[in-house]
Image (spheres, grey):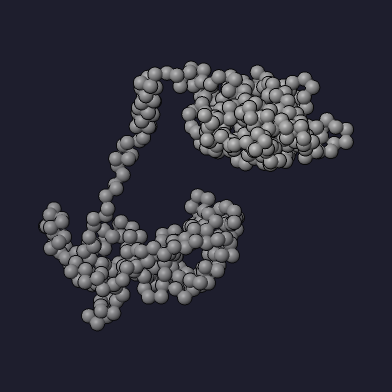
């Protein structure tokens, strides 16, 4: 498996859970499952709203970017919005591939991404404004 | 020619979009997926509506933020933790690129591993002991039932008919003895006494010089035919077998023995009641059937007793049941 794909797996679980240890465990399991050719992942439902990471966990964020807005979004967004946003906007997977994987239409994927981006944009502007008011 | 599938414009040549459609098209507008006419219409709507402009700003901010997040990197150490498996076997398989090997070689190695495993197991099994095990069912036939007590007076025909038709006999202490619990030497003596002289002559040709004294048969000799008739008339016997897990069995065993004896229980095998068998106490005894519930309550005081009634060749006298209970050391819960 290519290193870039492994990085994508790791990033997916990190942004989905915001828990460094869980993300690592899930990534190891996913890698093991994919490496053996099995397509039956058995992950339990991801608990959200309890971020658990630090700078020593091995995730290197770009300079000037913090996860405050993402934490708000990750806590409040629906599963569909969260997953579609991660896949489409962070991992840069094409809408067609996402639609094929989820067995939904491309329009549905775009709708979910748009909704997710709107929530994320609102969370981001709220996190950057001193009052901390979310404009929805 | 105008395509009929394209929505027509209004009389003024405008294509007005509703607020709902405008909002839903904003993402496609930013990502430049709209056709020129729709884009032009949406431009007009955006210029008119402040709410649409706000929504557009949110999506742009979200896109920019996601663009930044997508540059997040996982450190090489982290990737190594994901890639490298934990067990030595997996490390070995991965390092050797076993998955990339040709299928034939992989199958050959797997077959060889299985063959070596089977060979090792076959070598380790103690075949001499296994072959010496007698796994065939018992094919012996009982041809006679004999009374061991020589001094017992002969019983009349009427008394013979009143004798219990089971294999169970009681001694003067009331201890129930079973036929298979008699020592081999005693059986030999009894058979010697019970068999008629002719039979002894056939079995001991060397002793023909001195005619043996006729043995006194003190118990009714039952022919095979009669035995079969009786067996058909009788119901099958039963045995109650149970296990109990209790704490501190060394202390409770004497108490249980005492209570069983008080209920009229008697040991049924060769060993005493509460015989220490490894880390457990063994109770093989008979008891009046009427005391069965009381007995259950007794065991329940020390733990959860599980007793099962099993079919057994031995038939007990009416009102008497036979039990084998094993009390094991352990947590009663």
Residue A21: % across, % down: 68, 31
Q: Is residue B38 above or below residue A6?
A: below
Is residue B143 something that shows in the picture?
Answer: yes
Residue A127: % across, % down: 81, 33
Q: In screen coordinates, is A132 left or right of A44? A: right
Q: How many marks?
A: 0
Residue drawn 55% across and 67% down?
B298
Residue B218: % across, % down: 25, 72
For the C terminus of chain B, the quadrant is bottom right
- Residue B220 or B149: which is nearer the viewer? B220
Q: Is residue B297 above or below residue B282?
A: below
Q: In screen coordinates, is B212 left or right of B307? A: left
Residue drawn 52% across and 68% down?
B296
Residue drawn 36% across and 35% down?
B125
- Residue B231 or B186: which is nearer the viewer? B231
Q: Quadrant of residue B63?
A: top right
* Residue farthest front in this picture: B11
- Residue A77 or A125: which is nearer the viewer? A125
Q: Quadrant of residue B230?
A: bottom left
- Residue B7 or A30: which is nearer the viewer? B7
Q: Quadrant of residue A50?
A: top right
Residue drawn 15% across and 64% down?
B197
Is residue B177 something that shows in the picture?
Answer: no
* Residue farthest bottom in this picture: B158
Residue B32: % across, % down: 65, 26
């Amino acid at each position: 498996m290519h290193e870039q794909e492994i990085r994508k797996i790791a990033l997916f679980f990190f942004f989905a859970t915001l828990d460094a240890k869980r993300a690592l465990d899930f990534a190891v399991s996913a890698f093991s499952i994919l490496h053996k050719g099995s397509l039956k992942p058995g992950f339990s439902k991801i608990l959200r709203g309890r971020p658990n990471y630090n700078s020593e966990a091995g995730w290197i964020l770009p300079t000037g970017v913090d996860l405050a807005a993402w934490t708000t979004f990750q806590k409040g967004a629906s599963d569909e919005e969260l997953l579609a946003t991660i896949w489409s906007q962070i991992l840069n997977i094409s809408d067609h591939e996402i639609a094929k994987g989820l067995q939904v239409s491309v329009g549905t994927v775009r709708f979910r991404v748009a909704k997710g981006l709107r929530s994320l944009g609102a969370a981001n502007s709220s996190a950057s404004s001193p009052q901390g008011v979310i404009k929805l | 020619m105008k395509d009929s599938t394209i929505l027509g414009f209004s009389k003024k040549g405008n294509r007005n979009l509703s607020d709902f459609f405008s909002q839903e098209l904003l993402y496609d507008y930013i990502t430049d997926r709209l056709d020129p006419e729709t884009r032009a219409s949406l431009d007009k709507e955006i210029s008119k509506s402040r709410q649409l402009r706000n929504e557009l700003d949110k999506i742009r901010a979200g896109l920019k933020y996601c663009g930044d997040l997508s540059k997040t990197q996982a450190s090489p150490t982290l990737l190594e933790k994901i890639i490298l498996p934990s067990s030595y076997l997996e490390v070995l398989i991965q390092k050797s690129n076993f998955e990339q090997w040709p299928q034939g070689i992989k199958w050959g190695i797997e077959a060889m591993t299985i063959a070596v495993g089977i060979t090792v197991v076959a070598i380790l099994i103690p075949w001499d002991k296994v072959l010496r095990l007698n796994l065939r069912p018992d094919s012996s036939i009982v041809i006679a039932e004999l009374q061991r007590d020589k001094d017992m007076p002969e019983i009349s025909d009427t008394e013979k008919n009143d004798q219990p038709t089971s294999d169970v006999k009681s001694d003067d202490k009331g201890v129930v003895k079973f036929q298979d619990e008699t020592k081999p030497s005693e059986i030999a003596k009894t058979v010697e006494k019970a068999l008629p002289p002719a039979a002894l002559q056939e079995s001991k040709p060397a002793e023909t010089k001195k005619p043996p004294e006729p043995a006194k048969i003190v118990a009714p000799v039952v022919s095979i035919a009669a035995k079969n008739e009786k067996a058909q008339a009788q119901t099958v016997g039963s045995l109650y077998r149970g296990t109990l897990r209790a704490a501190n069995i060394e202390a409770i065993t004497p108490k249980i023995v005492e209570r069983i004896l008080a209920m009229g229980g008697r040991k049924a095998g060769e060993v005493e009641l509460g015989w220490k068998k490894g880390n457990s106490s063994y109770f093989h005894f008979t008891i009046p059937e009427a005391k069965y519930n009381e007995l259950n309550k007794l065991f329940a005081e020390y733990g959860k007793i599980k007793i099962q009634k099993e079919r057994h060749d031995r038939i007990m006298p009416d009102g008497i049941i036979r039990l084998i209970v094993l009390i094991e050391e352990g947590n009663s819960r």
